[in-house]
């Protein structure tokens, strides 16, 4: 399996930015139409809508999934980082969940279950989640076959 590092999709972030800009535009229009310049600080209130996509954008960059050397590593966090590495041969189940909006954007949530006590882990809003799930399952099968062939030779 080739090494690759994946991050959640930017599609949902861009949609949220677009919705925030529309809300800001409506807020500016409402201010200019109804406030009559009485409270100039009110013009900044619609900018609060930008906090949501900015938060999503930063959060997206803080999550990564890396497929390498028959292992899958999921890292997340900013100040405190969590890194979870799972042997591909131990992945038992890969689930893709998609809402209607995610289906329209071609993204979805990927849930992985592995053998062991810590069980499931997931990553939200991945591009082409079905193809990614198929790739992980195929990698899991190859890793299990490689492990079995090594164990059989010893």
Image (cartoon, rainbow, N blue to C red):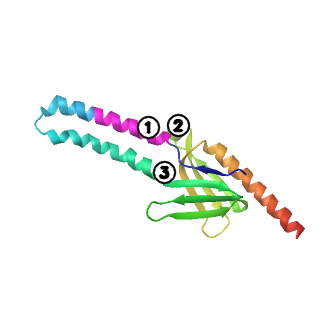
Classify mark 2: helix, strand or loop. helix
Which residue: 23% across, 30% down?
A: 29
Front residue of this view, candidates 96 and 11: 11
Which residue: 48% across, 51% down?
A: 61
Is 2 situated left or right of 152 in this image? Answer: left
Determine the CA span between mark 1 and mark 3. 17 Å
How packed mark 2 is, by other alpha carbons closer than 10 Å (few <14, some 14-19, many 20 or more), is some
Determine the CA span between mark 3 and mark 2. 19 Å
Tag 2 near tag 1, CB within 8 Å: yes
Image quarter for residue 113?
A: bottom right
- Where does the magenta region start and end? 10-25
Q: Earlier in the sequence, mark 3 or mark 2?
A: 3
Tag 3 near tag 2, CB within 8 Å: no
Say which mark, if any, is on residue 15. Answer: 1
Residue that carries the numbered disc 2 in the rendered image: 105
Which residue: 45% across, 42% down?
A: 13
Is 151 one of the magenta-colored residues? no
Q: Earlier in the sequence, mark 1 or mark 3?
A: 1
Q: Residue furthest right?
A: 153
Residue 41 on image: x %, y %: 17, 42
Name the magenta segment's main secondary structure: helix
Residue 99 on image: x %, y %: 52, 43
Classify mark 1: helix, strand or loop. helix
Is 17 situated left or right of 95 in this image? Answer: left
Quarter of the image that includes the C terminus: bottom right
Classify mark 3: helix, strand or loop. helix
Residue that carries the numbered disc 3 in the rendered image: 61
């Amino acid at each position: 399996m080739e090494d690759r590092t994946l991050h959640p999709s930017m599609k949902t972030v861009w949609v949220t930015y677009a919705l925030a800009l529309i809300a800001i535009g409506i807020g500016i229009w409402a201010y200019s139409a109804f406030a009559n310049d009485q409270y100039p600080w009110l013009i900044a209130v619609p900018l609060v809508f930008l906090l949501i996509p900015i938060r999503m954008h930063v959060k997206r960059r803080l999550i990564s999934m890396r497929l390498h050397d028959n292992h899958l590593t999921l890292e997340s966090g900013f100040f405190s980082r969590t890194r979870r590495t799972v042997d591909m041969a131990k992945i038992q189940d890969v689930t893709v969940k998609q809402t209607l909006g995610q289906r329209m954007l071609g993204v979805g949530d990927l849930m992985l279950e592995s053998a062991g006590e810590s069980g499931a882990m997931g990553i939200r809003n991945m591009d082409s989640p079905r193809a990614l799930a198929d790739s992980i399952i195929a990698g899991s099968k190859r890793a299990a076959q490689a492990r079995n062939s090594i164990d059989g030779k010893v």
